[in-house]
Image (spheres, rainbow, N blue to C red):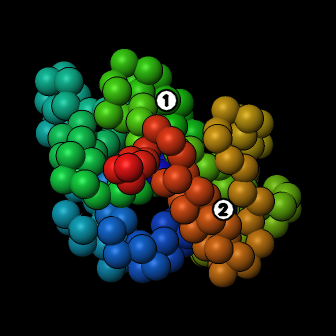
């Protein structure tokens, strides 16, 4: 399952809640060139690479998707995702709108990915609510927040490219809706095996 949202919309919180609620759900750990934030651990929250390390892997074709966001590179290793899918795990992807578009494109030619891919766009009820969340987070200067809001307006317009639109309410309501999507998607005929007669 892929969850995308504008910066500050709550996708990381929702992903954390899903991982706690679903024991078979695991996340694909994203690679990044940005420095770790307080409390983040290498190999758990992200794979932290230098710009040179990231570029070498990019040129080797190791990434399923990659993008540069706010001056830092991000990407998901193909081996990370496909290895977990092949091990029978449900995999959670937490990616931006650009990454989601790239992964949808990759799924066209990758049957394993196409069969497993379910996309959700999470958005707050308004840009004003998003602005409040970004300010409350206290991680960015006002100029950076304004830049993030401008990007968010463009990202929100892409919601129609996703399988599901989840307009954020409370954390528990967002979790309930995401779990309902997960459960219904598991019952789709392309992902199910009927009992033998």
- C-alpha separation, residue under disc 1 versus residue under disc 2: 21 Å
Task: Determine the image quadrant of residue 126.
Answer: bottom right
Q: Is residue 121 visible?
A: yes
Task: Determine the image quadrant of residue 122.
Answer: bottom right
Q: Which residue is mark 2?
A: 9
Q: Is residue 2 left or right of residue 153?
A: left
Q: Residues within 10 Å of mark 1 (few under 14, many from 20)?
A: many
Q: Which residue is mark 1?
A: 104
At horizontal 14% and vertical 24% (from top left) the residue drawn is 60
Nearer the observer: mark 1 or 2; the answer is: 1
Residue 78 x/y as whole percent: 24, 37
At horizontal 35% and vertical 50% (from top left) the residue drawn is 196
Q: Is residue 185 left or right of residue 154?
A: left
**Is the Cβ of the residue at disc 1 closer than 8 Å to that at disc 2?**
no
Nearest to the observer: residue 20 or residue 116: 116
Q: Is residue 157 left or right of residue 38?
A: right
At horizontal 20% and vertical 65% (from top left) the residue drawn is 42
Residue 165 x/y as whole percent: 72, 50
At horizontal 38% and vertical 49% (from top left) the residue drawn is 197
Nearest to the observer: residue 83 or residue 139: 83
Q: Earlier in the sequence, mark 1 or mark 2?
A: 2
Nearest to the observer: residue 141 or residue 193: 193
Residue 146 x/y as whole percent: 72, 52
The vertical placement of 119 against 123, above or below, is above
Q: Is residue 3 visible?
A: no
Q: Residues within 10 Å of mark 2 (few under 14, many from 20)?
A: many
Q: Residue furthest front?
A: 197
Callout 1 secondary element: helix
């Amino acid at each position: 399952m892929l969850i995308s949202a504008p910066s500050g919309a709550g996708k990381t919180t929702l992903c954390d809640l899903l991982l706690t609620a679903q024991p078979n759900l695991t996340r694909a750990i994203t690679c990044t060139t940005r420095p770790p934030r307080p409390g983040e651990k290498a190999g758990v929250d992200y794979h932290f690479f230098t710009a040179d390390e990231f570029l070498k892997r990019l040129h080797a074709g190791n990434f399923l998707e990659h993008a540069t966001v706010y001056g830092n590179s991000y990407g998901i290793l193909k081996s990370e995702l496909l290895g977990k899918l092949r091990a029978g795990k449900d995999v959670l992807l937490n990616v931006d709108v650009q990454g989601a578009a790239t992964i949808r494109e990759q799924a066209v030619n990758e049957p394993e990915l196409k069969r497993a891919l379910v996309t959700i766009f999470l958005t707050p009820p308004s840009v004003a609510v998003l602005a409040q969340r970004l300010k409350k987070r206290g991680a960015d200067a006002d100029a950076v927040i304004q830049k993030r809001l401008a990007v968010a307006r463009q990202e929100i317009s892409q919601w129609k490219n996703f399988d599901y639109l989840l307009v954020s309410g409370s954390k528990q309501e967002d979790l309930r809706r995401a779990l309902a999507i997960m459960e219904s998607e598991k019952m789709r005929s392309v992902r199910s095996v009927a009992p033998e007669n």
